[in-house]
Amino acid sequence: MINISFKTDDDLMARVIISKNYMPTNFINYLYYKYRKSYLILKRDITSKDIDDNIIYELKQQEFFKNFSAEASENLKRIKNNWETDKQKINDFVDKIFKKNFVLNLTSFIVSPSLNTGRNIENNQFIWGHIKGMQDKNYDLIYLVHESLHSYFKKTDLTYAVIENITDIELKKYLRNIEYTFDDCHEYIKMLHMKIQPFWNIYMNKQKKEIKKINRLNHLSYNLKSFEKYKTQIKNMNIDEFVEFMENLNLENLIFVKQLYSLNIKQG
């Protein structure tokens, strides 16, 4: 089960604002020239303690920051209410995918939605606030789970693809009743998604008709019979066992991806 407590933290939000340059240009220049070392450190690591705290203090005195702070407080009320309303059905869904009992207690620091930020900062903590959540509460709910799961899995490309399978594809489909594809995930692990997909379909116990539909949407094809030998191994695994199994498969050598290219004339 995923349990989330929600907070706002102006100091942390100030760090996000600096890292993303969400400030008037003249104030960016002011901070850069007065606190150059601290400014550059925060661009790389928003949690660093090796900064001059005055850079945070000065930012918090600005009128535009006070607007961000008010927006964060309102955003917290809305997100917390939506999570409390839907957390049981979301946890039930995630538990079915995990195929095991687990408890994950986290703190989510909610920032202004205009900052478009989702970031796990370790120690079972993450930052969240995105403008898309204002139009669709499910967007917030999906990515609350996404950021939470970064605290469950170790950080690898494989586990990132698994997290995206769980949240950006399966949970998103569950909440919106619409199919989603690898195009909704990070581009840099799209190839890894393709290689994992036959094994994920077995793990999720997807039927042949559903697999064909998913593959068609992803412009993916493979011989289902070639992967049947893995079914007895995978079908009773929990999520930890599945990740370990995939880590030991050596996908780079096991799966060959033949790419097809579609050529079109540019318009204009």
Image (spheres, grey):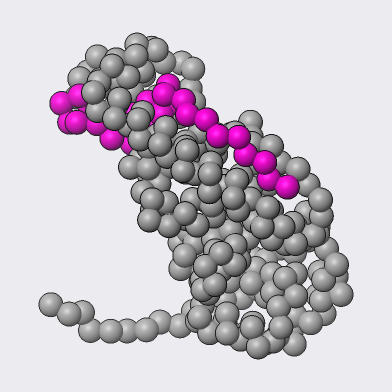
Image quadrant in which you'd find residue 158: bottom right
Residue 244 coordinates in the image, percent (x, y): 77, 56
Left or right position of 243 against 209: right
Left or right position of 249 against 168: right
Q: Residue at x 85, y 67 (%)?
A: 236
Residues 140 and 147: in front is 140
Q: Residue at x 47, y 29 (%)?
A: 8
Residue 229 coordinates in the image, percent (x, y): 82, 80
Residue 9 coordinates in the image, percent (x, y): 46, 25
Residue 92 coordinates in the image, percent (x, y): 72, 57
Looking at the picture, does residue 35 appear above or below residue 109?
A: above
* Marker count (numbered): 0
| Span of residues in magenta | 1-28
Left or right position of 4 against 116: right
Query: From where the camera sits, is residue 79 visible?
Result: yes
Residues 229 and 5: in front is 5
Name the quadrant of the C terminus.
Answer: bottom left
Q: Residue at x 48, y 22 (%)?
A: 48
Image quadrant in which you'd find residue 247: bottom right
Image quadrant in which you'd find residue 172: bottom right
Q: Is residue 14 magenta?
A: yes
Query: From where the camera sits, is residue 145 visible?
Result: no
Q: Is residue 213 magenta?
A: no
Looking at the picture, does residue 73 appear above or below residue 221?
A: above
Residues 188 and 94: in front is 94
Looking at the picture, does residue 131 appear above or below residue 230?
A: above
